[in-house]
Image: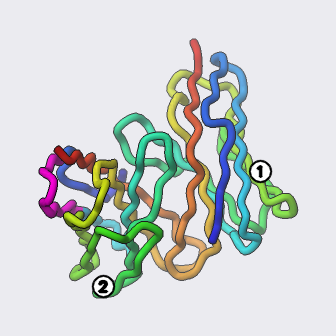
Amino acid sequence: GENVEQHPSTLSVQEGDSAVIKCTYSDSASNYFPWYKQELGKGPQLIIDIRSNVGEKKDQRIAVTLNKTAKHFSLHITETQPEDSAVYFCAASWGGSARQLTFGSGTQLTVLP
Amino acid sequence: DGGITQSPKYLFRKEGQNVTLSCEQNLNHDAMYWYRQDPGQGLRLIYYSQIVNDFQKGDIAEGYSVSREKKESFPLTVTSAQKNPTAFYLCASSKVSGGTDTQYFGPGTRLTVL
């Protein structure tokens, strides 16, 4: 089955700096890669996703890049703010009528004021 | 969280007791999912259902059971056979159609076995 590795497990940045979180996946058939943000005690919220037919997607301060050849994808957050502090999860799936997502282990991002 | 509700938010049970977690969605989504989250780990799939009266086991189904009698509801029962049930349980739902099957999560239920 699919295996997703996520790095780093913790990341601290100064407010205004950029943050990058990286994930690698094992199944070359995977074609959907969402990123979720989880605040303490809450359910994950989708922040951005990318499908295998594109290499990069942006939404304001957030971007995701995908390298299918190397089987890795990354989340980029620019101009970080204290409210960006949370746990971020990447995931991958190969599709089907109900996508079975395989999640990374999460990255605790702390934005220092 | 959108239109996905989970109840209760916190749940305590004694060892040897079965307990049922509720998940309801009003998004008209076809598929529903149950995940388990342990500290420092990602989410692991317990069960999922693509359509009413049908469901499939995920990676860690042992000690759990589900039902899908209505499109809006997908309750999860944690049985006494689950050896380590203390965890944060998350329900999700998605449409089942090409390109629009993003999963949306509920707020979660934290189960503690006393």
Structural crowding at the residue carrying mark 1, measured as other residues with C-alpha within 10 Å and reported as few (<14), some (14–19) or many (≥20): some
Tag 2, which chain?
Answer: B
- Residue at which label 1 appears: A65
Q: How many neighbours does mark 2 have within 10 angstroms: few (below 14), some (14-19), or many (20 or more)? A: some
The amino acid pointed to by label 1 is: Thr
Residue type pointed to by label 2 = Val
| Residue range highlighted in magenta | B11-22
- Residue sitting at x 47%, y 69%: B59
Point out residue B7 in the picture as x, y percentages from the top left corner.
19, 54
Q: Classify residue A91 by image quadrant.
A: bottom right
Separation (CA) of disc 1 from disc 2 = 36 Å
Taking the image as shown, residue A45 lies to the left or right of residue B18, namely right
The image shows residue B22, relative to residue A60, as above or below, that is below
Residue A78 figure quarter: top right
Which residue is rendered at x = 46% and y = 59% of the image?
Answer: B44
Query: Contact (CB < 8 A) between labels 1 and 2?
Result: no
Where is residue A59? Give x, y as percent: 66, 45
Tell me the element at label 1: strand
Chain at tag 1:
A
In the image: residue B10, left or right of residue A113: left
As displayed, is residue B113 above or below residue B78? above
**Coloring basis for residues:** rainbow
Who's the residue at 68% across and 35% down the image? A77
- Residue corresponding to mark 2: B52
> Quick one: quadrant of the N terminus of chain A?
bottom right
Choose between B83 and A95: the one closer to the eye.
B83
